[in-house]
Amino acid sequence: MAADNTGNGKDFVTLVDHSTGNSHDLPLMGGTTGPKVIDVRKLYAETGHFTYDPGFTSTGSCESEITYIDGDAGILLHRGYRIEDLAEHCSFLEVCYLLLRGELPKPDEKREFEQTITYHTMVHEQLMNFYRGFRRDAHPMAIMVGVVGALSSFYHDSTDINDPHQRMIASHRLIAKMPTIASMAYKYSVGQPFIYPRNDLSYAEDFLHMTFSVPPEEYKISPTVARAMDRIFILHADHEQNASTSTVRIAGSSGANPFACIAAGISCLWGPAHGGANEAVLNMLNEIGHKDNIPKFLAKAKDKEDPFRLMGFGHRVYKNVDPRAKVLKKSADEVLAELGVDDPLLELAQELERIAREDEYFIERKLFPNVDFYSGIILKAIGFPTSMFTVLFALARTVGWVAQWNEMITDPSQRIGRPRQLYTGHTERSYVPIDQR
């Protein structure tokens, strides 16, 4: 079967099945920007064939108005706004409003939304007992998956996906409670008492306070660190139809409640090929060990026969510069300058960045430091253990998941997710009784 698409102003492509001589016209669909797509929804019904696309790298699963990525040009837009502008001028909650509602908030809308999220930050007191059911050495992501999934057993008044008001309440609750849940996962792992949220602090400030403060003394929040934390949240808020977002959408397509859908997204994000990338950066730096070893490990990274990979450089989507990395490098420099952290690992990271940026091998291949490289450096400087890195990613990405889930629920063209397969097993066989095998 071959595609005949010569242009000529046609809004379809013609597929020719050379085994039968039959041809089939498939419509071309165009979005507001980006390449046109071939509508294959009737392909199987009309031809008896379906497409084969492992990883869905050439398949569009939905229409969306939320996020647009041009990987070749290094562009990331949320509702049409460049990520660089949002990270520079907006707070995380303004970006949350934008992703959920479609527009940046006016001053009164901003105040109302911030108040709504602030007054949803507390979690049900019985959740304290739920945490105590985990082992102390449980990974914080394991705790997150369990606790978020359990929220549906505490908040019955926001699980009806057909009620727009309940969907809105569930969305607000998830965005508001995720910092509380994440900080509690950290506190439980280190054996410290849970700290309740404070309504007088910003979203990022409150999270830092709940995570690092202890009852005997006051925790002083650095404005530079709080702003860096807010930027990390903004830069991880949404990233189009990635693995975890697609997981949330496909879970939601079955009619599952929003808390279960977000728990599914957290589970997917836990994978080292997805949300664990910034943790992998720190593990790589530990493996390198010292600045003197950098040339040796760069040589290993260039050797196709060597399994070593330079984590935090390059990106599957961005073939040029990761636009989020440019923003976060500024925050990394500010945080390291203010905190004055004397950490050999951070010095190693800075030296690795400098050398790699000057190496022709990496320049030619456009393997520049990505958002995971800089976020790992910042989070370590602030004091987060590597086990919390993916938790912070999940915290930030919750708003993207929620926005995508809401869009999917209200899309009349969406159906329950049901990918096809290319079957390569046995054809039909006769049953053989056990005494004859």
Image (cartoon, rainbow, N blue to C red):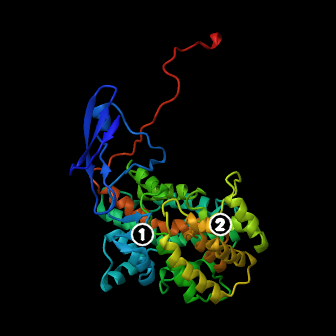
**Nearer to us in this view, 324 or 222:** 324
Determine crowd level at label 2: few under 14, some 14-19, many 20+ residues with C-alpha closer than 10 A: many
Choose between 114 and 27: the one closer to the eye: 27
What's the residue type where badge 2 is placed?
Val
In the rendered structure, which amino acid carries the disc numbered 1?
A: Ile
Q: What element carries label 2?
A: helix
According to the image, label 2 marks what residue?
Answer: 281
Q: Examine the image and state in which quarter residue 118 appears.
A: bottom left
Locate residue 389: give its quadrant: bottom right
- Residue 265: percent from left, percent from top: 49, 57
Q: Name the residue rendered at 64%, 59% in the picture.
A: 133
Classify 437 as above or below 247. Answer: above
Closer mark to the observer between disc 1 and disc 2: 1
Q: Residue 75 carries which label?
A: 1
Residue 367 in view (yes/no): no
Label 1 crowd bin: few (<14), some (14–19), many (20+), radius 10 Å: some
Q: Compared with residue 17, is residue 295 higher up or lower down, i.e. above or below?
A: below
**Picture quadrant of residue 159:** bottom left
Q: Residue 131 carries which label?
A: none
Residue 306 placed where, x, y %? 71, 53
Count of numbered badges drawn on the protein? 2
Choose the circle earlier in sequence order: 1 or 2: 1
Q: Quadrant of the N terminus?
A: top left
Q: Where is residue 140 in the image (x, y as percent from the top left)?
A: 62, 64
